Amino acid sequence: MQVPAAFQYRKATTVEHALTLLAEYGPDSMIVAGGHSLLPMMKLRLAHPEALVDINDLDELAGVRVDGDWLAVGAMTRHAELLASAEAGRLFPILHDAERVIADPIVRNRGTVGGSLCQADPSEDLSAVFAALRAVLVIRGPSGTRSVAARDFFVGPYQTVVAPGELLAEIRVPLRSSVSAYVKVDRRAGDWAVGAAGAVLVVEGDVITEAGIGLTALGAPGFVAAEAEAFLAGGSPSEERLVEAGRIASRLCRPAADQRGPVEYKRHLAGELVTRALRRAMERI
Ligand SMILES: Cc1cc2nc3c(=O)[nH]c(=O)nc-3n(C[C@H](O)[C@H](O)[C@H](O)COP(=O)(O)OP(=O)(O)OC[C@H]3O[C@@H](n4cnc5c(N)ncnc54)[C@H](O)[C@@H]3O)c2cc1C
């Protein structure tokens, strides 16, 4: 059985305390939230923190609520909690579409929204979802609080703009009248995506005034199909245009071949999934 290398373990009691502990142990310390990604990586010796700062007791980072013009999701909100939030599902059905297909109840009961985003695994479903929603991520650190657009949060695979000594505190989604959906193809129920797409549309009359398209596991920079979004904005949501947006996303994404399929298949999937997500969103109007 694989075991991780030795590490120090400290349980934070407040966000300030967590930041103090991160400063005390330095750049080789890491936050542990649900532990569903970090602990397997430690066992495989792909991560070897000298200290873990546990933020599971920080109720101030948990929960889903409407806060003024925003839907605020605490970083420690469990997947199951987001799925159980009627308000989140009513405002942004894409959140429930995605949460329903993330792993299984055991993972969803423990894994957190913030952990998913900070892991920045190219196959993580919520990265594309919050990028499509144009969410803003609130990061706290020793010098205060800063906000970063979800689209600027991901630096590359397994890399984000969260610096050593900082933590992700909250995800904020701007409230607006929108329709949205997320569709995923996996090899079996609860598996990581072969590919997935999310769509968020603001439609006024017969014109799309805002389009957000997220892609999971399909090699889209920042998890976004930006050219397809630009094509849709300002035009009508006709079937032909939804299909064309899929074609654009398919042409411009850069999937990698792996055990889940070759490049050509994933590229085809990208186009099909984008069009399906857009259609499903429009059915909710
Ligand atoms: C069997 C299995 C199947 C899965 N299937 C899917 C799937 O289909 N789709 C999907 O999207 N995900 C899937 N996951 C991942 C799941 O969503 C995890 O919850 C997620 O990867 C990590 O969340 P966590 O809370 O466990 O984070 P952890 O494992 O605790 O942490 C992950 C990383 O984020 C950092 N971190 C965590 N929280 C913070 C914070 N607040 N601020 C700064 N850094 C932080 C940690 O230091 C670590 O680097 C699966 C996981 C498992 C075990």
Image: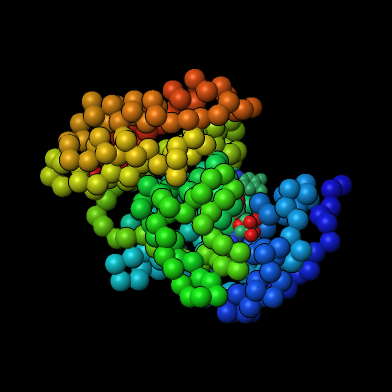
Relative to 220, 204 lies left or right: left
Task: Find the residue positioned furthest to the right.
Answer: 1
* Residue depicted at 56% across the width and 67% down the height: 166
Vertical order, 48 against 196 (above or below): below
Q: Nearer the viewer, residue 12 or 164?
A: 164
Quadrant of residue 245 within the rendered picture: top left
What colour scheme does the image use?
Answer: rainbow
The total of numbered circles placed on residues is 0
Q: Position of residue 63 (x, y in %)?
A: 48, 68
Q: Is residue 11 left or right of residue 285?
A: right
Left or right: where 51 falls relative to 264: right
- Using the rendered image of the protein, determine whether residue 124 is visible from the camera's viewpoint: no
Instruction: Give whichever of 274, 276 is nearer the camera.
Output: 274
The quarter holding residue 33 reads bottom right
Point 55% across, 75% down: residue: 142
Residue 58 image point, x, y percent: 58, 74
When the figure is inspected, residue 95 is found, relative to residue 7, above or below; the finding is above
Outermost residue, top side: 264
The quadrant of the image that shows the C terminus is: top left
Q: Residue at x 69, y 75 (%)?
A: 24
Q: Position of residue 179 (x, y in %)?
A: 29, 47
Left or right for 5, reference 124: right
250 shown above or below 116: above
Q: Relative to 180, does residue 85 appear above or below in the rendering? A: below
